[in-house]
Image (spheres, grey):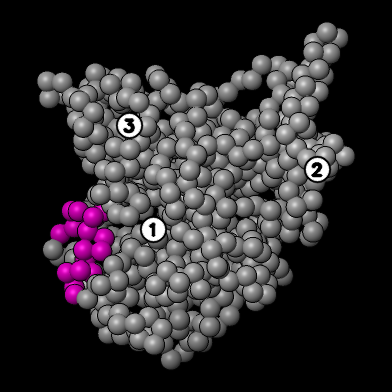
Amino acid sequence: MANRLSASIIAVLLALSAVYLQQPLNTFLNPPPTVVDLTQDITYIGSLHSATIEHFRNIFYAEEPTGYRRFAPPVPTKPPKGSVIDATKPGAWCPQGTGDILPFTSRVANISENCLSLRIARSKGTSRSDAAKLPVVVWIHGGGHALGSASDILYEPDGLVRQAAADGRPLIYVGINYRLGLFGFATSKAMIERKETNAGLRDQRAALEWVRNNIKAFGGDPNRVTVVGQSVGASDLGLQLMAFGGAQDVPFQQAMMMSGGPGLNFNSPPDQVASNTADIAQQLGCVKNGDDQGLQALECLREAPFELLTNLTVAASRAARPPFGEGYFYPTIDNDFIQARPSQLMRAGKFVKEIPLIASWVTNDGAWYAPLTTSTDEEVLGSFGLWLTSLSESTKEELLQLYPLEDFERMVRPEHDGPISPQYYRAAQMNRDIWFTCPVLDFTWQYVRNGGAKASQVRLYEYNETRYTPVFRAMGVPMWRVAHLSDIPYLFNNDHLEGGADNSDAHLSLAQRFSRAVIDYIHSEPLEGRNSGAGPWTPAFPEDVSQQGSLPSDVPSTISIQIFGGPHGSSSVTVRKEVEERDLTESEKAVYWEKLFSRCEFINGQQMRDEAGV
């Protein structure tokens, strides 16, 4: 025992020396933060940011998914006892296209299959002691299953962590990487038979299990974990709740879904992604005797050089789904992790229960999905035609009627946006509701309706403020307004957002209030509005399943939404299906204008769900 302890001490000293040799003199005077996992005899060496935040980066939760592990479920890492892990530098991003994305996001440069890592941030001096047991927030990034990383500057956690500590409610932050594109979501008959599908979702589950098993060493409480996902990260979070038909518990206790729900998962049967996978196999010469679904094609894909496979898949996905290839490879039914279409699982109550939820959208979530040149009914329908390929003519006609052109004429601002047709705003709103708002409403309502949680445990918000206005103006797209991603810098309380974004005091004040409201939630404190400045955060639905036993309708008749920002300020707004507009406040009228009841009733209805494959 003494010998092993001596060896561990020597290993730590050697690792620290290696870190020191690469750092300036002040590193010797201020040694880097160090975490020792006494249970497993593992030491993590991190770095100090802005004097108050400790970072531990590039901590692997799974083995390198290469060779025979490519496409396969992740294999948890088991560092040898006495290991010293250098967690001072960010790791590689999972395979994706390189280059610039948006002015306020990171430039993608360092990609590798050896990317199944996470980053941890906490306040300086956080103790491992049982007295600490801080709540944990885990971040699942978006990016259409085509791009992104926990290391993106947009997701810098320092502001959130610092605010929590300043308020006397510290927390531990964890961001995770997971496989994307073909590497994360390829499928074929052979893959389904071998349960080697939806690798990206299985990566997320493995990362969450790592947090459950290891976060105590960093001062976190594995029984107080809140997972926050954005866009497809939110959709994936919903799929985690429905994984294995809800038969397996999840390694978290609360969820927050930003701009996304499982209904975003269009065409969930595997046919389309299997065809996309087969096309890549064909380009590589992996298809023999016409069999693009068998084991031979799979083995050939596994043997393909990483760079070649990445280049082919990025080119194919971006050609089919410009500009970034979103939604070309994505989660599909595999009769294992995903056992049926998400909307069917939701309505059958096949999900993990008793998980409190916050879910949301932003006011113009669909803005960048509509081409700026949209000016006809056909172009409006074509704005989502790449993804929803099986909509009937009657469905398309009903959508056009639910979104009459005159509803959007008042949105035209030629002095700000140039010669934009109201058809563009019509298409943007339709995309917002199909992609984000209606899936969010459907998932939260079905979760309450089918016994997932009490109505008092489920809340909604709409974010109607953005710090990207000057960026969008410089990009030539001022009409995007409060576009997708707008609430992210407010959540992270980022006071130095990149790319020419608005860092003015008014926005930073709103960011502080919003991040404080989320910190309340992470700490499982009542959302009474004392920190959000928006009044009490009313539960999304008034009915209580625990009292009524079951809720009668497939759609809600009353919705309460917390509004953050916008011309009428932050407040809680309740709207009802049957109400006269003249009786509403200005805030209520703004939500009423969105026509959530009639539009989402159709979008979430049986006909469109069947045609969309959600």
Q: Quadrant of the N terminus?
A: top right
Rate crowding at label 2 as few (under 14), some (14 to 19) or many (20 or more) other CA atoms within 10 Å: many
Judge by depth and name the residue closer to the eye, 590 or 5: 5
Rate crowding at label 1 as few (under 14), some (14 to 19) or many (20 or more) other CA atoms within 10 Å: many
The stretch drawn in magenta includes residue 388: yes
Quadrant in which residue 36 is drawn:
top right
Rate crowding at label 3 as few (under 14), some (14 to 19) or many (20 or more) other CA atoms within 10 Å: few
Magenta stretch?
376-392
- The overriding secondary structure of the stretch rendered in magenta is loop
Q: Is residue 132 above or below residue 539?
A: above
The stretch drawn in magenta includes residue 273: no
Q: Nearer the viewer, mark 1 or mark 3?
A: 3
Q: At x 79% / y 51%, what residue is drawn?
A: 51
Tag 2 residue: 126
Q: Is residue 364 visible?
A: no
Q: Is residue 179 above or below residue 286?
A: below
Q: At x 33% / y 38%, what residue is drawn?
A: 311
Tag 3 residue: 308
Element under label 3?
A: helix
Q: Kindly identify which numbered label has been placed on residue 401.
A: none
Q: At x 49% / y 81%, what residue is drawn?
A: 588
- Inspect the image, locate mark 2, and give the three-letter code of the amino acid beneath it: Thr
| Mark earlier in primary sequence (2, 1) | 2
Judge by depth and name the residue closer to the eye, 19 or 105: 19
Tag 1 residue: 439
- Inspect the image, locate mark 3, and give the three-letter code of the amino acid beneath it: Leu
| Mark earlier in primary sequence (1, 3) | 3
* Gap in angstroms between the C-alphas marked 1 and 3: 36 Å
Q: Nearer the viewer, mark 2 or mark 3?
A: 3
